[in-house]
Image (spheres, grey):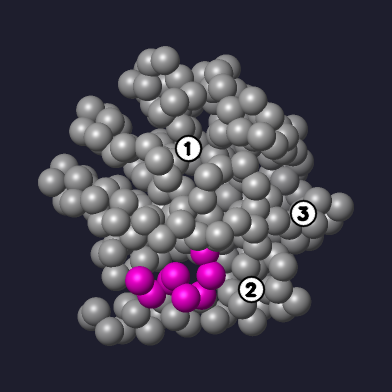
Amino acid sequence: MNKVLLSPSILSANFCILGKEIKNVLKFGADMIHFDVMDNHYVPNLTFGPMVLKSIRDYNISSPIDVHIMAKPVDSLIPLFAKSGASIITIHPESTYHLNRTLDLIKENGCKVGVAINPAISIDFLDDIIDKLDIILIMSVDPGFSNQKFISNTYKKVQAVKKKILRSNRNISISVDGGIKFCHIYPLLKLGVNIFVIGSYIFRNSSYKSVIHKIKNSIIDFKNLVV
């Protein structure tokens, strides 16, 4: 079983004190940071660019950062985010005309490779590119905004993705992003999810420490059960 990681999505953070927000969640036990890039074209919102990512790195934040690019076209952005400090770059297959080439570009720029799958998108495309992947990100909401309701069909999609990974005999992480609350953690763990992207549930809580510890303790309890 891959190590289970908690990845707070800074889309729900207080942008006025973004560096401090990130340091706080890392201090209380978060493992990595999820950095949502939206272009108001592929998705109906406008968020962060490479300069914001660089400023985070310049603020002495060294944790892994998964840059989730929800923008079209995407290829020209990949080198910029890689140079600015991305550890992982995750893209949507619909954002490029040449998916294999785009995934190769991520790897060539020194980042781990991820693809994101929207709720209504079939997973069949994975058969052609699964050998290039480090992470498969399953969206449990339609991308664009924080604080949405978790789509229950996500469980079936996770199960189907896990089967493809097992058939591929590759060590690929499964990440889920969108509307995750405490009640979703255990069912997703049972299906093989090992990266939890959580935004509103953490950043809209009055105590980051208590909510992160609650999530992490749930993960520890699950791991103890399956050992």
- Do the CB atoms of the residues marked 1 and 3 lie less than 8 Å apart? no
Residue 206 within the magenta-colored segment of the rendering: no
Q: Is residue 77 above or below residue 64?
A: above
Q: Quadrant of the C terminus?
A: bottom left
Q: Nearer the viewer, residue 151 or 126?
A: 151
Q: Which residue is mark 3?
A: 19
- Give the x, y percent position of residue 73: 55, 18
Nearer mark to the viewer, of 1 and 3: 1
Secondary element at tag 2: loop
Amino acid of disc 1: Thr
Q: Main secondary structure of the magenta part?
A: helix
Highlighted magenta segment, given as a residue range: 180-187
Q: Tell which circle, 1 or 3, labels the residue nearer the N-terminal end.
A: 3
Q: Label 1: how many residues lie within 10 Å, few (<14), some (14-19) or many (20+)?
A: many
Q: Which residue is mark 1?
A: 90
Residue lying at 46% horizontally and 32% vertically, measured from the top left: 92
Q: Label 2: how many residues lie within 10 Å, few (<14), some (14-19) or many (20+)?
A: some
Tag of residue 28: 2
| Count of numbered labels shown in the rendering | 3
- Do the CB atoms of the residues marked 2 and 1 lie less than 8 Å apart? no
CA gap, disc 1 and disc 3 = 22 Å
Q: Is residue 193 above or below residue 125?
A: below
Residue sitting farthest toward the right:
16
Q: Quadrant of residue 112?
A: top left
CA gap, disc 2 and disc 1 = 25 Å
- Give the x, y percent position of residue 129: 27, 30
Amino acid of disc 2: Phe
Amino acid of disc 3: Gly
Q: Is residue 12 left or right of residue 66?
A: right
- Give the x, y percent position of residue 143: 56, 43
CA gap, disc 2 and disc 3 = 15 Å
Q: Tell which circle, 2 or 3, labels the residue nearer the N-terminal end.
A: 3
